[in-house]
Image (cartoon, rainbow, N blue to C red):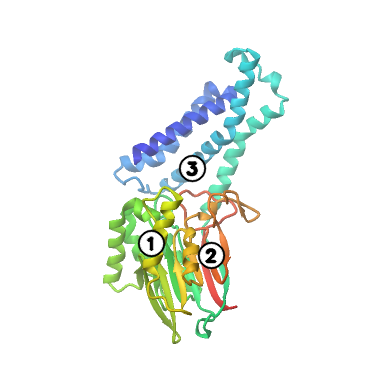
Amino acid sequence: MLIARLFFILVLNLLAYVVLRRLWPASASGWRRWTFIGLVALSLLAWGLPLALGLGLHGQIPVVGAPLKMFSAVWSVAVLMGVVFGAPFAISRWWKGRRSGVAPGEAMGLVNLERRSLLVNAGRAVPLVAVGTATAGVASGSSGFVVREQEVRVRGLPAALEGFRIGQITDIHVGPFISPEYVRSAVQAMNDAGVHLQVMTGDLVDDLEQIDETMAALEACRAPHGMIAILGNHEHWRGLEPILAGYEALSKRGAPVRLLVDEALVLEHSGERLRVVGVDYPMGTRTPFARAERMRQSAEVAFQGVSPGETVLCLAHHPSFFPYAAERGACLTLSGHTHGGQVAVLGIPVFGFVFEFMLGRYRQKDSHLYVSGGTGHWLPFRIGVPPEVTIVTLRTA
């Protein structure tokens, strides 16, 4: 995985250099070129140095480790944005020079003659905009979570469950940028909010070396009904067995944390039953049809025994499970997975087209869905979609 990551970073930086050279020909020589190479080396050092010191891929070097990784994140995002948005301008200039029949070396000498061109000036602005946006996005993504309050009005909600409060954390991704202490602070935020039940809806940890500390952080839950967790895609990708063992260890020592995998747990609150259904992530599927079939199978197993009129809360990492939960009587489904696209303008996700249910609240007849923007991230870049700890209060419609 490390070799693949380093190879990807090197290729991305090479492409960025090609684009930059076309947009700003002066960057191809002298101190500017060496500055670019030095910044690339520094970004790679953030990952290579901990490994060389025996601290592992996600190891943290005291004092300089965190700033190095933050710089690497800013640089990587800026380089990616530079390639994506700068390539069209670079290709346009190359094509213009080719059509004019000017040799590449001579075309570089024509920069001054083209200075007033709007296209040229816009292309030159791309690197500056990329660095500025990357810096702002990483600063925003690293500033910590917000506590977001939501009220969901449920038709037919029993009087005993009026005001029932659920705290949700999801997509924390403990690893290079998120520590177990961050998880502890999110759990404490739910404790402070006085929720009756805490839920963790998948993608808890990416760095398997930090499983024990992460599970210990979940153990800080003080909700009367404890915490219920489900699995996300990253648990399957990173190493399912160690993570399952971590949850099992919590159970053995009596921690108030329970993992549900295509199963349900019935809670009793003030004499009223609340069924919590937790479904697995539909792994091993590359087509929408196959994924839908896996979700349907999970629904059939997890919703067994649901009684007519029973109040059902569904936990599903992938929000596309919502229709299956609604069909089987879930009054509320809590999901994550999308990170809200991590970029939004005026509250509207820029990449909202990627998922049918991207961020916030949705409704299908009497069934509700809330998709969290995520409590953490695997890359600290967010604009308009801050990390969140969600507090959901049930009310009678």
Q: Amino acid at mark 3?
A: Phe
Find the distance from the CA under tag 1 to the CA under tag 2: 22 Å
Is label 3 in contact with label 1 (beta carbons under 8 Å)?
Answer: no
Displayed quadrant of residue 358? bottom right
Find the distance from the CA under tag 2 to the CA under tag 3: 34 Å
Residue occupying the point 44% across, 52% down: 289
Q: Nearer the viewer, residue 36 or 285?
A: 285
> Which residue is the extreme one toward the right?
116
- 4 shown above or below 184: above
- 246 left or right, relative to 305: left
Find the distance from the CA under tag 3 to the CA under tag 1: 44 Å
Residue 224 percent across, percent down from the top left: 42, 79
- 263 left or right, relative to 140: left
Residue 95 percent across, percent down from the top left: 61, 21
Q: Disc 3 designates what residue?
A: 71
Q: Is residue 203 visible?
A: no
Q: Please identify, in this view, whether the residue under mark 1 or under mark 2 is nearer the observer.
A: 1
Displayed quadrant of residue 68? top left
Density class for disc 1 (Cα within 10 Å; few <14, some 14-19, many ≥20) is some
Marks 3 and 1, the one that precedes in the sequence: 3
Q: Quadrant of the C terminus?
A: bottom right
Residue occupying the point 52% across, 38% down: 80
Residue occupying the point 58% across, 22% down: 26
Q: Disc 2 designates what residue?
A: 370
Residue 222 percent across, percent down from the top left: 41, 75
Q: Amino acid at mark 1?
A: Gln
- 283 shown above or below 105: below
Q: Disc 1 designates what residue?
A: 297
Marks 1 and 2, the one that precedes in the sequence: 1
